Amino acid sequence: MFCYQCQETAMNKGCSMKVGVCGKTEDVANLQDVLIYSLKGMAIYAVKLREKGGLPTDEIKVFMAESLFSTITNANFDRDVFVNRIGEALRLRDELKAMAEKAGADLSDVVHDAALWSGSSAEDFDKKGEEVGVLMTENEDVRSLRELTIYGVKGMAAYTTHAQHLGFENEELFAFMEKALADTLNDNLSADELVALVMETGKFGVESMAILDKANTQTYGNPEITKVNIGAGDRPGILISGHDLRDMQALLEQTEGTGVDVYTHSEMLPANYYPAFKKYSHFHGNYGNSWWMQKEEFESFNGPVLFTTNCIVPPKKDASYADRVYTTNACGYPGFKHIVEDGNGKKDYSEIIEHAKKCKPPVEIESGEIVGGFAHNQVIALADKVVEAVKSGAIKKFFVMAGCDGRMKDRNYYTEFAKALPKDTVILTAGCAKYRYNKLDLGDIGGIPRVLDAGQCNDSYSLAVIALKLKEVFGLEDVNELPIAYNIAWYEQKAVIVLLALLYLGVKNIHLGPTLPAFLSPNVANVLVEKFGIAGIGTVEDDVRLFMGE
Ligand code: FSO
Ligand code: SF4
């Protein structure tokens, strides 16, 4: 096992023990490597097929995106899922090969083992897991650029999958993911070509967030300023976590009139901001904080929990809640019940609802309200007010503090940083990073709250749209001329695609923390520093001074 894809990787070098810091076991880590390797094998044939004007089937495209998604940090810990997916990947690889041949592709140069190996049992796959993986690429710079691409593609696949669930697709995204997977096996690509591949990943990252934004807003309306109740009611509840709004909708529909309330957790909080969900009186609000607080918060919630995506934390052995956690989509955990679609693409949540009815109501752990819903449409509606505040000097600077939260103590930095920012600054946030400061009383500037939450990590797209709009309003040439600083927190691979997307959009001088990714080799890190001014974080005092230009 060797995994260094997330921010919490052991010693900021790599997890190479029996169990990763996230709780991923060695066998699952190795099977994930085999799955990625098999997807690369599929991709080789998919590229050949597309060169001849053919298209992979919907089944293949969805399978590839969901498989990438299932290997994201904290998404799926279930060995059986990976054994099944690898078997499926090999079957679909053969199907793609036959399709490419039929389309007239010349396959004589397909010699890579990823496209040719075979296996049929869990033992075969375990054995293969000892041979393939990140360390297969010996040169650390090539490895770094390949993995940077793959992690970006994983994040892209997650967003593409959510959009696809709502019926929104962009064929170019699937084509790019296939090309990128295949290119990471190509030993003939130069370092410059790999850097270009990383940048192209950022370009398609923007596209993946754009299509998900379109899918979410066209289906559920534009997020609007919303006060979200963070207290608890006196009826049993279901807690829904993750990022998939289609599951949110189905759960709200199916719980209506049942006497069971619905609460969001972690990254599902922004569901509260969508007009389409506001009509449900049993949608109670948000319970708790970001993903890593789940061990305590699921205990006190008392009712069932539905994970629609990561981040899952393995429950302690004596956890009272393990038998009331359900998963769906690409996520899973051994022992948690997994809900799948029926033949008509519908999910039946009646088991969770019946389960909830037998549970006690949640224990209230906090009370009051928080405000959010500042995605692009809402902020642009307030543009006059915002521009006026900037022109008058009431707002001196915006701080984009999007990204992820995590369990490491050093993330207190973000709480302290938010507190230390001058009162004439505004934080623009998205993703679970917000939980480090969204409950602080930071006040407002002429009615504009000092923390503007755009939504989920994918809604970082909104922050980019807002920046581009401000650039236009102020008549600037370059987005970097705006009074916006970027102090971003990352944890897993969706944050990698957000970062690459911002780089592609030309944003410079992003500070990334709490640590720089272990998968950046010193040389690759240097390229990012020199080309984009990427930097880590320092002390709160130094950073505030630096960002404020003092
Ligand atoms: Fe957070 Fe987890 Fe949204 Fe991630 S809950 S860490 S970047 O899955 O996806 O922000
Ligand atoms: Fe380690 Fe992160 Fe990989 Fe888990 S996902 S094994 S914590 S690097």
Image (cartoon, grey):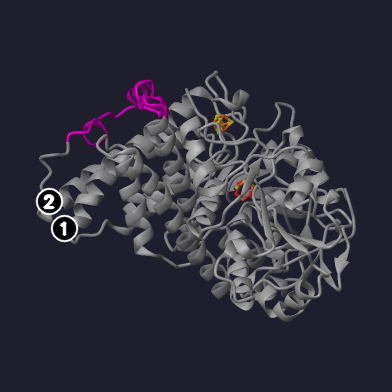
Marks 1 and 2 sit apart, C-alpha to C-alpha, by 6 Å
Q: Is residue 481 left or right of residue 363?
A: left
Rendering coords of residue 364 (x, y %) = 88, 50
Rendering coords of residue 298 (x, y %) = 75, 42
**Quick check: 295 above or below 140?**
below
| Tag of residue 163 | none
Q: Is residue 234 visible?
A: yes
Please give the residue where the numbered disc 1 appears in the rendered image: 52
Which residue sits furthest top? 17
Location of residue 322 (image quadrant):
top right
Please give the residue where the numbered disc 2 appears in the rendered image: 105
Magenta-highlighted residues: 111-140
Compare residues 128 and 43 and report the one nearer the observer.
Answer: 43
State yes or no: Cβ of the residue under disc 2 lies below 8 Å from any atom of ligand 2: no
Asked whether residue 118 is drawn in magenta, I would say: yes
Q: Is residue 213 left or right of residue 413?
A: left
Residue found at x 19% / y 50%: 48
Task: Report crowding for label 2: few under 14, some 14 to 19, many 20 or more residues within 10 A (C-alpha).
Answer: many
Location of residue 317 (image quadrant):
top right
Residue found at x 44% / y 67%: 168
Compare residues 175 and 500 and report the one nearer the observer.
Answer: 500
